[in-house]
Image: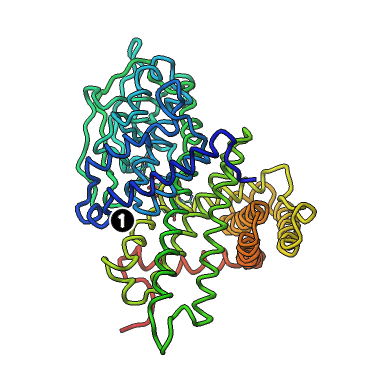
Amino acid sequence: MHELATHERDIVPQLVDQVRRFMAREVDGAAIDRRGVIPESVRSGAASLGLFGMSIPEEHGGAGLSLRAVCDVISEMARADRSVAIMVGLHAGLGTRGPVELGTKAVRDAYLPRLASGEWIASFAATEAGAGSDLASLRTRGEVVGDTLRLTGEKAYVTNGGFASSFTVLARTPGFGGARGHSLVFVPRETPGVEIGAEEDKLGIRGSSTVTVSFDGATVPLDHVLGTPGRGMEHAYHLLTWGRTLMSAGCVGTGRAALDAALAHVTTRRQFGKPIGDFAATRLHIARMAARLYAMESVVRGVADVHASGGSLEAVSAIAKVFASEGAFKLVDRALQLQGALGFLEGPGVARLLRDCRITRIFEGANDVLLLRVGLARLAAHDVPRGHILGVVPAPLRSAASEVDGLAERLGEVVADVRARHGVTAVRHQLVLQRLAVAEISLYAATNSVLGASSEEQFALASHATDLLIEEATTSLDALSRADADERRALAMSEVLYAPYRDGRDAPGLSP
Ligand SMILES: Cc1cc2nc3c(=O)[nH]c(=O)nc-3n(C[C@H](O)[C@H](O)[C@H](O)COP(=O)(O)OP(=O)(O)OC[C@H]3O[C@@H](n4cnc5c(N)ncnc54)[C@H](O)[C@@H]3O)c2cc1C
């Protein structure tokens, strides 16, 4: 489990090593953050290393690496700088998977070689000012005119948009391949009618380009439609599985940077006559950070395994995205706490890491919304939650495996109970779905952590990670049994809050 494919075993560690040296030599994360731009030299350096072609098939000039290998590279990049990792990760995932997997021969032949070399950088444009989590409400329209598609509308928050040469655009295309259908379209930047807005001023990943892109009658040949007309929404969600997995890999890199920083600090910073790392409470924090990071990495590798075996990434990539982004934020926050006042400073501390990773809990699907999807998927699934791993693990992992099996059994019982109590109306019970999802995610992470461990050190990490995850799952399942009452209380409370607010008064609280 979690192994690189045989043909990649030699090349991927070498590539990761090259990337590590490239990032250390060429990338000044603080300067990128300060200036809000990635220097051209970094882009061209990444291109000469072949990073823009990693996931593009060899016949189109790329390296055709597996998802697992691309994750390893993105993780290493993110460890050094998240803006640069996002530029490459977005290109390798959401930006180019459309033409690679769904493009016509004309599109693949014409554009993939340029995208593989890094001459062209790719982007993905689905979100609009009025359509975020509710993507189906988007308004950008594609109209068939002869043998062309004419696009009108405006996309928001387009990563890489400021310097991208291509956009994978999701548009409403009524009547084209389905009465209420959407289609995914490959649009070169040079197309007349494509206008790029100003760069957004952001909290973090400030070097990453984020712009509005408008399409004012931008017209492309019909063969630039990606996949089946009318099935664009489904195709976009398919591309998001790659996007979310690579983003999760980036979160592993951020988490590793946080652990690096925490270790460097607690081993050298002395208080009360000794290094703060000598205090038991500090040691426990470091152990929990290492265990969580190990679990995050195991989850990402688990998703890559599913891909390598031809399985669907839809559910597991959402699980990875939530787990890795929440985990990275927890790790960075803990590193900052351990660094004390120093952590709060922009130069020596992890302040930039904290700002950079905050967005990962929002983009490519806000975590609150993804939790609902993961919960629903568990309720709708025919299989029972995975367990039964006790019989397949080595002796040092038996206790952890038995805990995992116990959690799987309890989750199975809770799912049966929720189905019996709510039936199809469960979809309306958000707290039930989200709490179920937390347990499902913890189970997936614990299972992958245990099954992927293959050394003494990893046995220890996996056991510790399991303790942590079982604790989180148990808290969530306990809370699930109170979900109906919590929901009633929250709704009653919101009546008290909203009514005065809507009437223009302050929300209730203690009077001055
Ligand atoms: C830096 C950056 C880069 C981005 N890059 C891209 C890109 O390249 N391409 C692209 O297409 N988009 C991109 N996005 C957009 C991003 O994917 C969206 O921001 C994201 O999908 C969430 O949409 P929203 O911000 O409109 O949030 P909203 O949908 O408005 O949601 C806000 C909050 O409301 C709550 N909420 C919403 N719906 C529900 C619900 N059903 N139940 C309960 N709670 C709910 C959640 O708490 C959620 O966090 C980017 C955004 C940023 C900031």
Viewer-nearest residue: 60 or 198: 60
Image position of 345 with respect to 281: above or below = above
Q: Residue at x 21, y 22 (%)?
A: 192
Give the residue displayed 63% in from the left and 54% down from the top: 440
Please state the horizontal and vertical placement of residue 144, each as a whole percent of the image: 36, 16
Screen quadrant of the N terminus: top right
Vertical order, 297 against 128 (above or below)? below
Q: Quickly name the residue at label 1.
A: 204
Residue 323 percent coordinates (x, y): 53, 55
Q: Is residue 294 above or below residue 249?
A: below
Q: Secondary structure at mark 1?
A: loop
Protein image colouring? rainbow
| 255 or 468, nearer to the observer | 255
Residue 168 percent coordinates (x, y): 37, 30
Residue 80 percent across, percent down from the top left: 36, 54
- Indicate the quadrant where residue 471 lies: bottom right
Specify the amino acid type for callout 1: Gly
- Front residue of 423 and 184: 184
Work out whether residue 239 can be spotted: yes
Neighbours of disc 1 within 10 Å: few (<14), some (14-19), many (20+): many
**Image quarter hosting the C terminus:** bottom left
Q: Give the side of residue 263 with respect to residue 84, left or right.
A: right
- Specify the farthest residue to the bottom: 272
Of all residues shown, which one is farthest toward the top?
146
Report the label total: 1
Q: What residue is at 70 percent from the left and 55 percent from the top? A: 418
Looking at the image, can residue 443 be seen?
A: no
**Does the closest atom of ligand 1 sit within 8 Å of the Cβ of label 1?**
no
